[in-house]
C-alpha cells in the first residue's frame, strides 16, 4: 500500500485512507475494505527492522538481476524539510517555561470520564498533553547537544530548537532560504538503473562527515564495497580520502586545494592581492619566506593533521610595524607580524590529487550529476519527498527508506520485469533498457 502510494507521489496517511474509499488501485490492494488512517500512519513507522530488512533483501534481488554492480557509486546529499514550522524554534528559557506548563496540565488532569467530553475525546486530550510534555523534554535534551557544540557563551545562549520536532535543525536550502530540515544522504549505484544502495539522515547541515557512513552502509547491505565512490566537493576532505582508501574505495571528486576559501579569508582581513601568499618567496635552504617588501618570515612551529602537516612562519612585529606596506599586507595585525602557513600533504593525498587531474577521473566525475542528482530530483518530484510527514530522526529515516524502496522497485519493474514481459517472458531476455 505505502509503496504504491509513494509511487503516486502520495505521502499523507489521511490521503491514502481517503483514496481507499474510491480509487480502483487502492481498492484492489485493500480488497475493497477501508483502512483507518491511524493504522496506515502507525504501520509506516512501527516496523523499523522489518523495513530495513526488506530494503536490503530487494537490493540482493537487484544484485542477482545485474542491476547493482558496485563498480562505482555516486553519492550526494539533499535537504528535506522537517514536519515543523520555522516559528516553533525556542531558546532554553522559553522551552523550560512551556515544559513546566505542560507538566502542570498533566498533573491537573482528572478522570476523563468526569469531563464533559466523551471518554474517547478525553483520553485523546490526555494523550496529547503527555506527548507534548515528552516532546518538550526531548527539546531540552537536543538543546543541550546544540549548546555543547557551540564555542562561546553568546552562541550557547542563542541556541534554539523546535518544540514540535526537536531533532531537526535549521538548514540552508538551494533557494537560499533556511528551514527546519534533515540532511538526507543518498548513495546510488553507477549503472543506468540508478539503484539506491544506501540512505540515511543527518542532523548536520554539512556533508563532510556523511560519505564514509554511506560507504559502510552499502557494505553492510550488500556484503561488498564499491570500487569507486564519486562525490561533489562538499564531501572532499583529506580524512575522507584516506578513510575511503583504507576501505579499498577510490574516492573521485574535484581536487580543490582550498585556494578559493583562502582568498575569501584574505579579503575579509583586508589584505591587498599583491600580498597574497603566492607573492611570498620561499627559500627552502633557510626554511623561511621573504615578503614582497623584503621582510623575512621565519619558522615558528608545526601542527600535524590527518593527511597534512602545517608549518607556520611569522615576521617580527617590529619589522611589520615600521613597514610602509603594512596597510596592504597585514592591516588587522595589532602587535604581531604577518603570518603564513605552508602545507605539506601526505604522499597518498598528493597521489590522489594527481589522479583526479587525469582525463579518466574527470570523465567519471561528469557522470555524477546524471545519476545522483537525477535520483535526488526523482525522490522529490515523483515520490513527493519534499517534506517529511513524520517527526523525529528515527521516523523520518523510515520515511526516507520507504521512498528509496519505492524508487528501487520502480526501477526494477522498468528495467527487468517490463523488458521480460515484452520479450515473451524469457528469463534474462535482455539487456537493460535505456535510462
Image (spheres, rainbow, N blue to C red):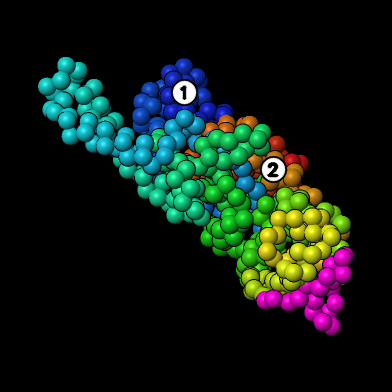
The residue closer to the viewer here, 202 or 67, is: 202
Residue at x 79%, y 79% (from the top left corner): 287
The residue tagged 2 is 373
Q: Is residue 90 magenta?
A: no
Q: Is residue 295 magenta?
A: yes
**Residue 80: in sight, yes or no?**
yes
The residue tagged 1 is 15
362 sits to left or right of 432: right
Residue at x 81%, y 55% (from the top left corner): 328
Q: Which mark sits nearer the N-terminus, 1 or 2?
A: 1
Task: Give x and y (percent) for residue 71.
Answer: 70, 59
Q: Are marks 1 and 2 in contact (CB under 8 Å)?
A: no
Where is residue 294, by image quadrant? bottom right
198 sits to left or right of 354: left
User: Is residue 392 placed above or below 177 in the rendered structure?
Assistant: below
Task: Give x and y (percent) for residue 207.
Answer: 61, 51
| Cα–Cα span, label 1 and label 2 | 29 Å
> How many badges with numbers are in the image?
2
The residue closer to the viewer here, 84 or 26, is: 84
Badge 1 local density, few (<14 within 10 Å), some, or many (20+)? few
The residue closer to the viewer here, 164 or 46, is: 164
Where is residue 21, by image quadrant? top left
The residue closer to the viewer here, 200 or 227, is: 200
Task: Give x and y (percent) for residue 41.
Answer: 40, 33
Where is residue 214, by image quadrant? bottom right
Badge 2 local density, few (<14 within 10 Å), some, or many (20+)? some
Mark 2 falls on what kind of element?
helix
Amino acid at each position: 500500500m505505502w509503496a504504491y502510494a509513494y509511487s503516486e507521489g502520495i505521502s499523507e496517511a489521511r490521503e491514502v485512507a481517503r483514496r481507499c474509499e474510491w480509487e480502483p488501485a487502492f481498492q484492489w490492494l485493500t480488497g475493497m475494505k477501508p483502512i483507518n488512517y491511524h493504522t496506515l500512519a502507525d504501520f509506516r513507522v512501527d516496523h523499523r527492522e522489518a523495513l530495513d530488512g526488506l530494503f536490503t533483501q530487494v537490493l540482493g534481488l537487484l544484485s542477482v538481476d545485474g542491476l547493482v554492480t558496485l563498480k562505482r557509486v555516486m553519492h550526494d546529499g539533499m535537504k528535506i524539510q522537517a514536519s515543523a514550522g520555522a516559528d516553533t524554534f525556542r531558546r532554553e528559557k522559553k522551552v523550560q517555561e512551556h515544559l513546566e506548563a505542560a507538566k502542570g496540565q498533566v498533573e491537573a488532569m482528572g478522570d476523563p470520564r468526569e469531563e464533559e467530553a466523551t471518554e474517547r475525546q478525553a483520553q485523546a486530550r490526555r494523550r496529547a498533553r503527555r506527548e507534548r510534555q515528552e516532546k518538550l523534554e526531548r527539546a531540552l535534551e537536543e538543546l543541550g547537544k546544540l549548546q555543547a557544540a557551540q564555542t562561546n557563551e553568546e552562541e550557547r545562549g542563542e541556541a534554539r530548537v523546535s518544540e514540535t520536532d526537536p531533532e531537526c535543525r535549521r538548514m540552508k536550502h538551494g533557494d537560499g532560504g533556511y528551514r527546519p530540515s534533515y540532511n538526507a544522504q543518498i548513495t546510488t549505484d553507477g549503472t543506468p538503473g540508478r539503484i539506491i544502495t544506501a540512505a540515511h539522515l543527518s542532523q548536520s547541515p554539512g556533508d563532510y562527515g556523511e560519505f564514509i557512513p554511506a560507504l559502510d552502509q552499502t557494505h553492510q547491505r550488500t556484503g561488498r564495497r564499491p570500487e569507486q565512490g564519486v562525490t561533489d566537493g562538499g564531501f572532499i576532505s583529506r580524512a575522507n580520502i584516506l578513510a575511503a582508501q583504507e576501505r579499498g574505495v577510490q574516492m573521485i571528486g574535484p581536487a580543490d586545494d582550498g585556494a578559493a576559501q583562502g582568498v575569501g579569508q584574505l579579503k575579509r582581513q583586508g589584505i591587498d592581492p599583491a600580498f597574497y601568499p603566492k607573492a611570498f618567496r620561499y627559500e627552502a635552504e633557510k626554511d623561511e619566506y621573504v615578503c614582497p617588501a623584503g621582510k623575512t618570515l621565519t619558522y615558528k612551529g608545526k601542527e600535524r593533521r590527518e593527511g597534512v602537516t602545517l608549518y607556520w612562519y611569522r615576521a617580527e612585529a617590529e619589522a611589520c610595524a615600521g613597514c610602509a606596506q603594512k596597510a596592504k599586507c597585514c592591516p588587522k595585525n595589532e602587535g604581531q607580524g604577518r603570518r603564513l602557513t605552508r602545507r605539506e600533504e601526505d604522499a597518498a593525498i598528493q597521489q590522489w590529487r594527481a589522479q583526479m587531474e587525469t582525463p579518466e577521473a574527470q570523465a567519471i566525475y561528469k557522470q555524477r550529476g546524471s545519476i545522483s542528482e537525477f535520483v535526488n530530483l526523482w525522490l522529490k518530484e515523483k515520490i513527493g519527498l519534499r517534506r517529511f510527514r513524520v517527526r523525529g530522526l528515527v521516523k523520518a529515516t523510515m520515511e526516507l527508506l520507504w521512498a528509496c524502496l519505492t524508487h528501487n522497485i520502480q526501477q526494477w519493474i522498468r528495467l527487468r520485469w517490463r523488458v521480460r514481459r515484452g520479450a515473451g517472458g524469457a528469463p534474462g531476455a535482455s539487456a537493460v533498457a535505456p535510462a
